[in-house]
Image (spheres, rainbow, N blue to C red):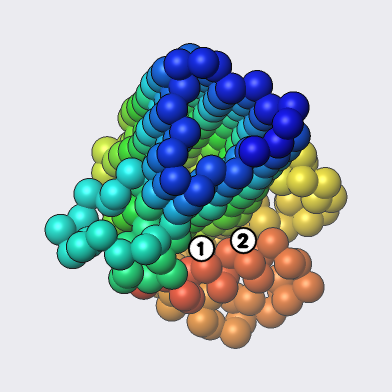
């Protein structure tokens, strides 16, 4: 343990706990297992971190969070699996993040610079990218994959094995049972594609010309008689956008989707 870590006298540390420089552990927190906490991270009181769990630098974990507990999966039999969290994340009250299973990569993973608001649940084997914002009471089921800069509105439920592409924007109280391509907006129960996340594209530094082409592509695909996968597999539809990297990223996501793309909003 680092000599300048501040651990409250009521906190309980057991197992192989490694604390970096300037780490703070609040009252009645429990760190139990093979745990590594990076420099500058602050763990508020009554938080529980278990298992094989690593948090990077300068994270803030608020009170009553639960990180690294066994997955809610009946196939899990106590195998050695992990939780890995990057740097500069804010994890608010009552968030739960479960360790992975043996079914995939044995890890539940979150990137850096994310905000998880109160009562968010990240299930086993999920992967959350960088710079994501997940609003209150969102549930990610097992094996969900989120790209960078995804925003999810409050009260949204995301089913197993769903992929949310980079820069997607999901409205509140949405039920997601299909993949969302990169930089698309979507909402509803069940989820429907609404349009393009123009603000997200601007924040990523994409030019007006490229954004205009992305919007045109989406509208053409939306109005086409072809299903999205069939549309992007037609050379005549894609020829005009061969140099547009965002359109090509969207097309790859549509082709590679295993559960199918959400239908368009009508």
Please state the horizontal and vertical placement of residue 78, each as a whole percent of the image.
25, 60
Q: In which quarter of the image is residue 39?
A: top right
Is residue 230 shown above or below 176?
below
Q: Which quarter of the image is occupied by the N terminus?
A: top right
Is residue 148 shown above or below 258?
above
Element under disc 2 = helix
Q: Residue furthest bottom?
A: 235
Q: Which of these two is toward me, 65 or 266?
A: 65
Q: Which of these two is toward me, 100 or 232?
A: 100
Q: Which of these two is toward me, 201 or 60?
A: 60
State left or right for residue 259 relative to residue 3. left
State left or right for residue 119 relative to residue 44. left
Please state the horizontal and vertical placement of residue 228, each as a whole percent of the image.
44, 68
Identity of the residue drawn at 74% across and 51% down: 211
Residue with the mark numbered 1: 221
Q: Do the residues labelled 2 and 1 touch (CB within 8 Å)?
A: yes
Identity of the residue drawn at 21% across and 55% down: 73
Q: Quick check: can you spot residue 225?
A: no
Q: For the residue carrying disc 1, how many other residues have a C-alpha within 10 Å: few (<14), some (14-19), or many (20+)?
A: some
Element under disc 1 = helix
How much space separates mark 2 and mark 1, taking CA atoms? Answer: 6 Å
Q: Quadrant of residue 172?
A: top left
Q: Which quarter of the image is occupied by the C terminus?
A: top left
Identity of the residue drawn at 31% across and 70% down: 103
Please state the horizontal and vertical placement of residue 17, each as a whole percent of the image.
53, 43
Q: Quick check: can you spot residue 90?
A: yes
Identity of the residue drawn at 73% across and 76% down: 242
Image mark for residue 217: 2
Q: For the residue carrying disc 2, how many other residues have a C-alpha within 10 Å: few (<14), some (14-19), or many (20+)?
A: some
State left or right for residue 247 relative to residue 64. right
């Amino acid at each position: 343990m680092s000599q300048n870590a501040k651990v409250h006298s009521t906190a309980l540390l057991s197992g192989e706990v490694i604390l970096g420089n300037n780490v703070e552990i609040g009252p009645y927190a429990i760190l139990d297992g093979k745990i590594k906490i990076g420099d500058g991270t602050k763990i508020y009181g009554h938080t529980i971190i278990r298992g094989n769990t690593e948090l990077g630098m300068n994270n803030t974990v608020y009170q009553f969070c639960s990180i690294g507990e066994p997955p809610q999966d009946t196939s899990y039999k106590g195998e050695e699996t992990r939780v890995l969290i990057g740097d500069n994340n804010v994890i608010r009250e009552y968030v739960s993040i479960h360790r992975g299973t043996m079914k995939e990569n044995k890890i539940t993973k979150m990137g850096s610079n994310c905000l998880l608001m109160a009562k968010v649940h990240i299930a086993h084997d999920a992967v959350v990218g960088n710079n994501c914002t997940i609003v209150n009471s969102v549930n990610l089921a097992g094996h969900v994959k989120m790209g960078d800069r995804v925003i999810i509105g409050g009260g949204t439920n995301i089913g197993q094995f769903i992929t949310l592409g980079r820069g997607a924007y999901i409205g509140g109280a949405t039920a997601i049972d299909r993949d969302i391509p990169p930089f698309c907006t979507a909402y509803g129960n069940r989820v429907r594609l609404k349009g393009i996340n123009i603000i997200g594209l601007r924040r990523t530094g994409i030019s007006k010309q490229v954004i205009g082409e992305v919007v045109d592509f989406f509208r053409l695909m939306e109005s086409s008689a072809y299903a999205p996968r069939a549309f992007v597999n037609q050379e005549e539809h894609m020829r005009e956008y061969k140099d547009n990297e965002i359109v090509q990223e969207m097309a790859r996501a549509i082709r590679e989707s295993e559960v199918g793309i959400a239908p368009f909003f009508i």
